[in-house]
């Protein structure tokens, strides 16, 4: 009986500890109740609602901040901006009552879903990684309406977004973005080939590239030719000019008569690329571009 009681107490303690951790995690990011515009120059966000409190960040006139309180508390708004949460005096913030504006944001965690409507019940248009930047065009019931770099639009829950002053503010460089694309693609090495597949359950070649790029907010068609002709990014025609993360395309006329491309993959560096090859070749694999079949039928790459 004593053993059972001790075990039950341990379970109760762990349950309480887990609940506390979840509550702390939930409190770490708050949903916005609206947005406001900074009306002065070099306006300071403070750690507390006091002019003697620590300065967290200085904001330019016109900066859009997330409002975390409906009304000022003792003449101070509780706000969030560029990954900081603090207080700005109400004299320097005007609330946007129409909730239609243009500013910028970035995902503050990984696996952020862009929804087709401002609801967790709506379809997922894309899933983006932490740090992905986008344009924010409005606010609705705790959600931001957003537009990603290459046209994906939808809604993201406001607690998953940091409003920022520009699209290049604190975002990753092209090289590190390419590395992130490669890292994600390589997590799916060995995934089986499925004709028409575009999920981790199984990929075909264009389904694989479409899926990987969708995780970075880039919407691509589900054909190799469609991706090559999408008009996105910058075309590269030399293998030596490719950068990690670039899309690569091939065309074997004997297998794809009348179309621009018969195959697609993602360049990983060192003359190698990753692709969903075929059911005979273990699905997602690495192959070389420097010789053989893929060197012969290389069409070009796209740097996005």
Image (spheres, rainbow, N blue to C red):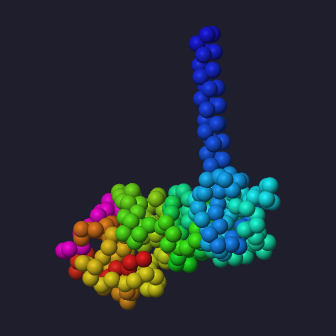
- Residue visible at 69% across and 76% down in the picture: 101
Q: What's the magenta region?
A: 280-292
Q: Residue at x 68, y 72 (%)?
A: 40
Residue 272 in sight: yes
Would you place residue 236 above or below residue 138 in this image? Answer: below
Image coordinates for residue 113, horizontal then vertical, percent: 59, 62
**In front: 131, or 123?**
131
Q: Image quarter for residue 58? A: bottom right
The x, y position of residue 215, in whole percent, is: 49, 65
Q: Nearer the viewer, residue 262 or 49?
A: 49
Q: Quadrant of the C terminus?
A: bottom left
Check if residue 284 falls in the magenta segment. Answer: yes
Q: Quadrant of residue 134?
A: bottom right
Rendered location of residue 119, percent (x, y): 70, 62
Q: Is residue 177 left or right of residue 29?
A: left
Indicate left or right for 225 with 158 as reference. left
Residue 10: x %, y % from top left: 59, 22
Q: Residue furthest bottom?
A: 258
């Amino acid at each position: 009986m004593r053993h059972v009681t001790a075990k039950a107490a341990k379970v109760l303690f762990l349950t309480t500890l887990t609940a506390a951790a979840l509550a702390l995690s939930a409190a770490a990011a708050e949903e916005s109740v609206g947005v406001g515009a900074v009306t002065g120059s070099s306006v300071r966000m403070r750690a507390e609602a006091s002019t003697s409190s620590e300065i967290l960040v200085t904001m330019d006139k016109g900066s859009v901040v997330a409002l975390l309180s409906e009304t000022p508390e003792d003449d101070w708004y509780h706000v969030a901006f560029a990954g900081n949460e603090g207080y700005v005096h109400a004299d320097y913030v005007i609330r946007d009552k129409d909730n239609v504006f243009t500013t910028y944001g970035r995902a503050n965690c990984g696996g952020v879903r862009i929804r087709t409507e401002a609801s967790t019940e709506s379809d997922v248009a894309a899933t983006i990684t932490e740090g992905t930047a986008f344009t924010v065009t409005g606010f609705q019931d705790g959600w931001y309406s957003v537009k990603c770099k290459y046209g994906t639009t939808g809604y993201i829950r406001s607690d998953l977004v940091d409003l920022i002053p520009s699209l290049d503010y604190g975002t990753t460089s092209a090289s590190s973005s390419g590395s992130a694309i490669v890292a994600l693609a390589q997590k799916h090495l060995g995934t089986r080939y499925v004709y028409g597949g575009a999920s981790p359950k199984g990929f075909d070649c264009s389904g694989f590239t479409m899926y990987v790029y969708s995780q970075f907010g880039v919407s691509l068609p589900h054909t190799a030719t469609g991706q090559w002709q999408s008009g996105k990014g910058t075309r590269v025609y030399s293998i030596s000019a490719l950068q990690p993360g670039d899309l690569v395309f091939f065309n074997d006329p004997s297998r794809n008569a009348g179309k621009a491309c018969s195959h697609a993959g993602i360049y990983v560096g060192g003359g190698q690329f990753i692709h969903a090859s075929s059911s005979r070749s273990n699905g997602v694999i690495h192959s070389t571009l420097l010789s053989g079949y893929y060197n012969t039928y290389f069409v070009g790459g796209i740097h996005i």
